[in-house]
Image: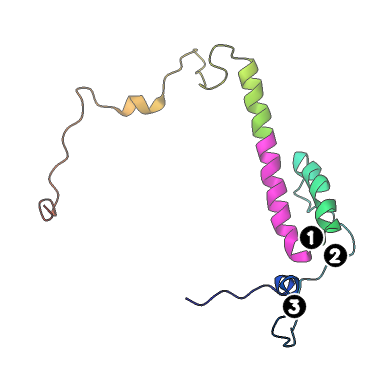
Amino acid sequence: MPNPPVPFPLKVLRGNPGKRPMKPEPQPQQLPDVPDPPPFITGYAADEWWRTAPELHRLGLLTRIDVPALAAYCHAFGQWRMAAESLAKMQANDPIMNGLIIKTKYGDATAVARTRLAAGGFAPPSPGKFDGLFG
């Protein structure tokens, strides 16, 4: 299997032992300023954008191509923060189970999947068309 191509910056760092001319690869255009977040980035997601984007821009790692990936990360971060806060509220209101089981309006903590179990155990599976072919 052939070796993958070496990125140009890595070639420069390693030096040029063959002394052949090195042609730089095309690079994405650097943004002149830190871009504003897309309109759907709000709340915690926007906070994370303004915490992360300036540093990436300063390091030259935030190009036009990177903005959608950063937006996706910030959106996921915002969703995680909201979920974590919701779970913390549930935990604070439930000192016994710490919010790990959601109770019905009657205070029951039964799993819905249990209602699908048949009484009397499980029946063995019926033989399949290919049973007995191997072994």
Q: Which residue in the protein does label 1 denote? A: 62
Dot 2: within a 10 Å radius of its alpha carbon, few (fewer than 14), some, or many (20 or more) residues?
some
Farthest residue toward the front?
17
Q: Horizontally, is 26 left or right of 54 in the view?
A: left
Q: Horizontally, is 50 left or right of 127 in the view?
A: right
Q: Quadrant of residue 69?
A: bottom right
* SS category of the residue bearing label 2: loop
Q: Quadrant of residue 57?
A: bottom right
Query: In the rendered structure, does residue 130 fall within the stretch colored magenta?
Result: no
The circle on residue 31 is: 2
Whole-percent x and y of residue 97?
A: 53, 16
Q: Earlier in the sequence, mark 3 or mark 2?
A: 3
Query: In the rendered structure, does residue 66 fall within the stretch colored magenta?
Result: yes
Q: Which residue in the protein does label 3 denote? A: 26
Three-letter code for the amino acid on which mark 1 is drawn: Leu
Q: Which residues are magenta?
A: 61-81
Disc 2 to disc 1: CB gap under 8 Å: yes
Q: Which secondary structure type mostly characterizes the magenta part of the structure?
A: helix
Residue 117 vs 16, above or below: the answer is above
Dot 1: within a 10 Å radius of its alpha carbon, few (fewer than 14), some, or many (20 or more) residues?
many
Three-letter code for the amino acid on which mark 3 is drawn: Pro
Q: Earlier in the sequence, mark 2 or mark 1?
A: 2
Q: Nearer the viewer, residue 18 or 40?
A: 18
Three-letter code for the amino acid on which mark 2 is drawn: Leu
Whole-percent x and y of residue 95?
A: 59, 12
Q: Quadrant of residue 26?
A: bottom right
Farthest residue toward the bottom?
20
Farthest residue toward the right?
33
Q: Nearer the viewer, residue 19 or 134?
A: 19
Separation of residues labelled 2 and 1 (CA atoms): 7 Å
Residue 77 vs 18, above or below: the answer is above
Q: Earlier in the sequence, mark 3 or mark 1?
A: 3
